[in-house]
């Protein structure tokens, strides 16, 4: 996600300095028109705007406050935008530390995946002050579809909104897979069933946009199963902390945890469906006539 974002910012005329935990990324960064820094602090020390796009909350904490971290190096009055799908509790601690130094903060986790990052059409769920978001809009519009930059509320609201989006998507994938397993075992043609579901009140973005990939054997390896489980754990814990009924949320999280235990921290957003297929002894595959 970060490299194509870096390329788009450079192509739009912004001076970009990038850092990554993998030194092997230096050549790719310089080839896209940006400059390389060996540490997050090196990238942040002259930045008016710092954007972080990282695997999860532990990585954000390390990049911002670990050895060679960016937070202490950021100039006062800079702005930090975290586009990581992170946990609200972890984000609150870092945001407070940044604001204590006079640094403006937005949490703006991104949706859309690598293809949208390359096209500059990400969806952003922004949490923070509206004035800060307005000030950053020209830069964000290089990375995201301007019509899909959503101001979700104050700091932390972006993180929560993105987690809820992912919760529903993961939950829909499991519910859809269970429906397809029932239909398949009952003798229905999966292609016919897919079309019927897509053109019915039961339709969802998962059915319309992602089900064909599953039916062709693609478990969407752009994202790690461990990260899926981590995000679901964060939103399930939030529901418990708020004292809310959340049976479906907890079940979705438990299913992904079982998949993680079965397959390990491998790539595949839909490996919870693979677990259901394995338990059923059925592979959900559509074979066109």
Image: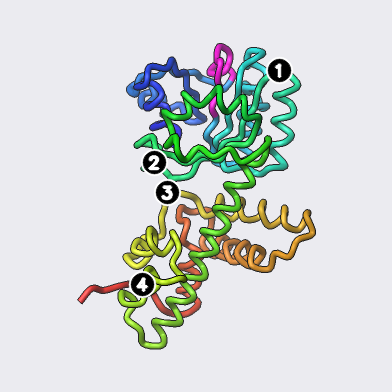
Q: How far apart in space, not on screen, are marks 2 and 4 (Cα)?
A: 25 Å
How far from the left and from the top, in percent, is residue 42? 55, 16
The residue positioned 41% from the left and 82% from the top of the image is 183
Q: How far apart in space, not on screen, are marks 2 and 1 (Cα)?
A: 32 Å
Of callouts 4 and 1, which one flags the residue occurring earlier in the amino acid sequence? 1
Residue indicated by mark 4: 194
The residue positioned 38% from the left and 17% from the top of the image is 13
Occupied quadrant, residue 257: bottom right
Q: Which residues are magenta?
A: 41-51
Residue indicated by mark 3: 222
Count all numbered tags in the image, as a single digit. Answer: 4
Q: In the picture provided, is 90 more to the left or to the right than 192?
A: right
Q: Residues within 10 Å of mark 1 (few under 14, many from 20)?
A: some
Q: Is residue 218 above or below residue 59?
A: below
Quadrant for the C terminus in the image: bottom left
Q: How far apart in space, not on screen, are marks 3 and 1 (Cα)?
A: 36 Å
Residue 288 is covered by the magenta coloring: no
Q: Are marks 3 and 4 in contact (CB under 8 Å)?
A: no
Q: How far apart in space, not on screen, are marks 4 and 1 (Cα)?
A: 53 Å
Residue indicated by mark 1: 102
How far from the left and from the top, in percent, is residue 234? 67, 51
């Amino acid at each position: 996600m970060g490299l194509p974002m870096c390329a788009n910012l450079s192509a739009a005329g912004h001076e970009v300095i990038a850092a990554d935990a993998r030194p092997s990324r230096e050549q790719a960064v310089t080839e896209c028109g940006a400059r390389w820094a060996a540490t997050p602090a090196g990238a942040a020390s002259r930045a008016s705007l710092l954007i972080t796009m990282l695997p999860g909350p532990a990585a954000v904490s390390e990049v911002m406050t670990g050895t060679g971290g960016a937070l202490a190096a950021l100039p006062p009055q800079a702005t930090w935008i975290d586009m990581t799908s992170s946990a609200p509790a972890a984000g609150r601690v870092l945001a407070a530390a940044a604001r204590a130094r006079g640094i403006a903060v937005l949490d703006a986790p991104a949706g859309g995946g690598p293809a949208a990052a390359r096209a500059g059409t990400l969806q952003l769920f922004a949490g923070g002050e509206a004035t800060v978001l307005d000030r950053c809009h020209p830069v964000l519009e290089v990375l995201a579809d301007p019509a899909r930059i959503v101001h979700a509320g104050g700091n932390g609201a972006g993180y929560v909104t993105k987690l809820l989006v992912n919760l529903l998507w993961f939950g829909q994938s499991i519910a859809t897979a269970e429906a397809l397993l029932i239909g398949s075992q009952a003798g229905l043609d999966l292609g016919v069933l897919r079309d019927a579901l897509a053109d019915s009140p039961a339709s969802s973005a998962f059915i319309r946009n992602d089900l064909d990939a599953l039916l062709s054997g693609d478990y969407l390896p752009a994202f790690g199963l461990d990260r899926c489980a981590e995000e679901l754990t964060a939103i399930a814990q939030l529901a418990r902390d708020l004292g809310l009924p959340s049976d479906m949320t907890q079940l979705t999280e438990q299913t992904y945890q079982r998949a993680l235990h079965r397959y390990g921290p491998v790539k595949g957003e839909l490996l919870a469906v693979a677990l259901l297929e394995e338990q059923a002894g059925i592979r959900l595959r559509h074979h066109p006539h």
